[in-house]
Image (cartoon, rainbow, N blue to C red):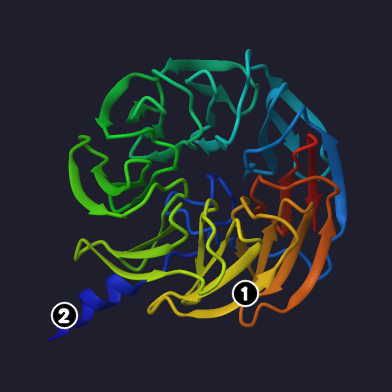
Amino acid sequence: MRTILLSIAVLMAVPTPPAGWTHFRGTPALTGVAGTAPADTLRVQWSVEAGESVESSAAIDGGVVFVAAKGAGLLALDLATGRKLWTYAIPGEGVGESSPAVAAGLVFVGDLKGTVHAVDAGTGRARWTYKTGSEIKSSPVIADGKVLIGSYDGNLYALVAATGTLAWKAVTEGPVHATASVVDGIAYIAGCDEHLRGIRVSDGQQVLEVASGAYTGASPAIVAGRAYYGTFDNEVLAVDLAGKRVVWRYQHPERKFPFYASAAVADGRVVVGGRDKLVHCLDAKTGSALWTFATQARIDSSPAVAGGRVFAGSNDGRLYVLDLKDGARKGVFEAGAPLSASPAIADGRLVIGTQDGRVYCLR
């Protein structure tokens, strides 16, 4: 009996929120939960003109913001002041939605030509590059000394983080748009081939496959043995990873629009924005709707949760601050341009980029 209880405790354990924000959605599990929260009333600490458009989300580590912008490449900014520390140029179309990840003194990002870049976090100098077969919109995730990143050539790549050498690549049946979430040595990808796959990080072998029933652009958040993600068939799914089955599906009773943004999972709640202009909050156990909040445009920005509040960007040019319990509006920041990038939160500050090329730091 004690063994069973211990197993249940391990399954239901929720990861501790991070001090930094080193990956898309904060950590390799992609939960979208921050360890520190901004002030109750958001104020602009600084803003920087970064490039033509910022569609990827920032990484924050060691007091430095790493952000990618079209037309400018990869930038390092001082978190306290916004001072530009260095710029790493990326030729061609540059970076689209791929968000930087930071580990062991290196910053990793993919570009629209299909190249993965590893850059020295202190100097901005190239350490290595690796060319895939097509464009990259997936964000890199660092696990077990490997960089995991998807490409539109249909593969999930594992590259040795220190050298860029190919460790393995796992073939899927469609473009790998979403970012892999990694928990307990397994990388989970919700794909354009309508399947959730589990790939073993050590050797690239597939250990799980569950049919989603629809094309998926969102990345799965993994909490307490379940994967949560939305689809282009207007649903949000919860998948039991041990049982290899979908345990619930949520669809708004009236508004039938895709879920492109990735979910945040905190305090037994799943929060996700939809192209129906709504922020949806669902019970993580049952999938039942707890509340919705209406914005004025579609939501492709993935929400973040910190200090009992939801921070959600919208294409209406506003960042909304909502109460996690009931969805009540606690504040709003007028960015003045669509927000498709997702907020990154660390050290009591929130960083987000806009489609007109500005990066804001709020606290």
Q: Is residue 27 left or right of residue 346?
A: left
- Residue 325 found in image quarter: bottom right
Q: Nearer the viewer, residue 116 or 14?
A: 116
Quadrant containing the C terminus is: bottom right
Left or right of residue 200: residue 12: right
Instruction: From the viewer's perspective, tell me whether residue 100 is left or right of residue 293.
Output: left
- Across and down, in percent, residue 282 comes to 50, 75
Whether residue 6 is situated above or below residue 225 in the rendered picture: below
Let me know if residue 289 appears in the view: yes
List the residue tagged with mark 1: 292
Which label was assigned to residue 4? 2
Q: Mark 2: which amino acid?
A: Ile
Name the kind of residue labelled 1 in the image: Thr
Residue at 64% in and 65% down: 278
Circle 2 SS class: helix
* Circles 1 and 2: CB atoms closer than 8 Å: no
Of the pair 79 and 260, the residue shown nearer to us: 260
Q: Position of residue 145 (x, y in %)?
A: 36, 34
In the depicted structure, whether residue 239 falls above or below residue 124 = below
Q: Residue at x 80, y 46 (%)?
A: 360
Answer with mark 1 or mark 2, whichever residue precedes in sequence. 2
Q: Residue furthest bottom?
A: 1
Residue 274 position, x and y percent, is 58, 59
- Residue visible at 43% across and 17% down in the picture: 130
Q: Nearer the viewer, residue 266 or 213?
A: 213
**Alpha-carbon span between mark 1 and mark 2:** 37 Å
Q: Is residue 308 visible?
A: no
User: Dot 1: what SS?
Assistant: strand
The crowd level at tag 1 (other Cα within 10 Å; few <14, some 14-19, many 20+) is some
Q: Say which quadrant the N terminus sits in.
A: bottom left
**Residue 96 location, x and y as percent?**
60, 31
Q: Tell whether 314 sits left or right of 4.
A: right
